[in-house]
Amino acid sequence: MKSIYLIAAASLAAVAFVGCDQKASTAKNERAQNAEASYVAPGEKDEYYLFYSGGHSGQVFVAGIPSMRHISTIPVFAPYPGAGYGFDVESKKLLGDYTWGDVHHPGLSQTGSEYDGRWLFVNDNANNRVARIDLRDFKTKEILGPIPNSMGNHGSSFVTENTEYILVATRFSVPLPKGRVADPNDYATQFNGMVSGIKVDPASGKMSVGWQILTPPFDWDLGSTGKGPSSGWAFWTSYNTEMAHTQLEANASQKDRDLAAVVNWRAAEKAVADGLATMMDGVPVIDPVKAPGVLYFVGIAKSPHGMDVDPTGKWIVAGGKLQPTTTVLNFEKIQNAITQKDFDGDFKGIPILKHESVVEGEVPVGLGPLHTQYDGLGNAYTSLFIDSQVAKWKMPPWSEDERKDLSKVVLDKIPVHYSIGHLVVAGSDTKKPYGKWLVAMNKLSKGRHLNVGPSQPEDSQLIDIAGAKMKMIAEAFAEPEPHFAQILKADKITPIEVYPKEENKNPNAIWEASQAGQTRNGTEVVAKMIAIRSRFVPDRLDAQVGDTLTVHVTNTEQSTDMIHGLGLVENNLNITIDPGETRTFQVKLTKPGVFPFYCTNFCSALHQEMQGYLVVQEAGAAPPPTASTTSTGGNN
Ligand code: K7E
Ligand code: CUA
């Protein structure tokens, strides 16, 4: 008896032991496989760039996929001393009066609905601007704005199929033109929103405001541009069709449906050419009631957020934050409804397309659907903010059986950590997505990292979408706050590593120590300086209180990664100069003294020795003998 018990107990224990061990080794295998999937060995490179918005940091972050390693921060709307951005004359001019921005939606330039690798556009929600980053050198080249007649540049920056325009829509409505004052109690009659077409010069990328479409005072939200059959069109969700101006969290959630905008931007172009626009604050503004065919509305699920056109251009998916479904619009049906005037009345003279006539279906994806992305294989991926999940579901066409119960097209769900906002599938907004990877950008990390105190990072998770089931692979953290992102195949671009000397057309560039020195004209002191391992020439500058000192620094190096910086002590100044580049800084001298300047970017064994002095005499002092000569000594 006893022995039987013993045997039974022993075999039970053995079963338990084997089971546990198997589980452990499966888990271990899986960990190893996942690690391998995102592992990029030292010296090897990632396959994709991830450009993700830096939110209220005002910057753009660059990481590699699949490693998720942060590679670079591209300063855009805020000073960034690490790149000397916001301290030299050129970048100060770009920033204008602002020292921050709120970046939400990066958009890569496209040709024929595919990424062409030329530019990355990003919006500033806070100060109504759009910026253009050149992917040749990953630098911000232009900031346009504040955009006239446009308040709260959130529904932006959506690139049209050949980068004809960056389309933007207003989050906030205000009395227009800006500067006009009206009582918020008269919100419905005195306030307006706006959709703007920011024209992009095809050769230079230079932006200008092309035209604008006046809209009722809804809060325009996310948008997307058409392609293929929907070429020339764009779509935005909105909230607050209630036109509330207080306690929006309750007052803007009264109706069961909100209105999305269906915009024919080619018709808008034509309306301006036909003289149907009137000028407001220097921009041709179209009243869509007077230019029929430019703007339509369509009712979609309550308080929507994301609006995403699929790679074929046939389907447009809206996420309904307060309704557990995505609304799938059929573009062909939209066209038919427009031709047949199949309207459900109008809103302030703008026709509302009949919901039932243009909606293909409402897919029960889960709670809090925000944004949708596509893999180009007929699958959609929707972020579920409330459920903290990504739902994978099948795009139309659907079978009769599926139509009857659309829960059947929901194929898979994966938990993310936590409260996902945007998600991105590589190339989702082009006609040929790369698929393969999905990055979930989660709002809360809730301590899934080393404890860094109360201010916690955002959590981004890499999900493998190549198989039938989604697979969680890796996790990375970023500073606040990634909203949207774009993924670009690395071999699409070949950024430069130095600025070629022959391309430097800056009239103040110098390449020889013999050309270096300073000149004075009244109180204007101008110096031309060279930075080269490991010295500045000249390494002495002379000026007086009351002078304006302008220094043009050329980094004459032509080797990769040989960057020099110039920090001027107690003058709140740091610039960095890339190889072959000339940068200019300007200081108004207000206090006498001797101020050291030094190289801030580690460049050589003698980096620490790379320094000089700015001698500032009292106002009116006789210029010292060395004032306009080149520095002597050193190793030149
Ligand atoms: Cu969803 Cu500004 Cu695109 Cu954030 S927005 S999540
Ligand atoms: Cu030059 Cu450090």
Image (cartoon, rainbow, N blue to C red):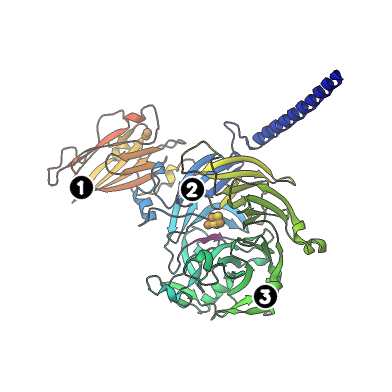
Find numbered disc 1 in the image and state the secondary structure of the residue it sits on.
loop
Ligand 2: which quarter? Answer: top left
Disc sitting over residue 486 in the figure? none
Q: Earlier in the sequence, mark 3 or mark 2?
A: 3
Location of the C terminus by quadrant is: top left
How far apart are labels 3 and 2 at the CA level? 40 Å
Residue 210 at x, y percent in the picture = 49, 68
Q: Amino acid at mark 2?
A: Pro
Location of the N terminus by quadrant is: top right
Residue 309 at x, y percent in the picture = 64, 61
In this orientation, which residue lies closer to the viewer: 263 or 607? 263
Q: Amino acid at mark 3?
A: Lys
Disc sitting over residue 480 in the figure? 2
Which residue has dot 1 on it?
590
Q: Identify whether 176 is placed above or below 312.
A: below
Which residue has dot 3 on it?
354
How far apart are labels 3 and 1 at the CA level? 68 Å
Q: Amino acid at mark 1?
A: Thr
Point 60% across, 44% down: residue:
461
- Give the residues in magenta: 152-158
View extreme (front): residue: 1
Q: Are marks 3 and 2 in contact (CB under 8 Å)?
A: no
Q: Earlier in the sequence, mark 3 or mark 1?
A: 3
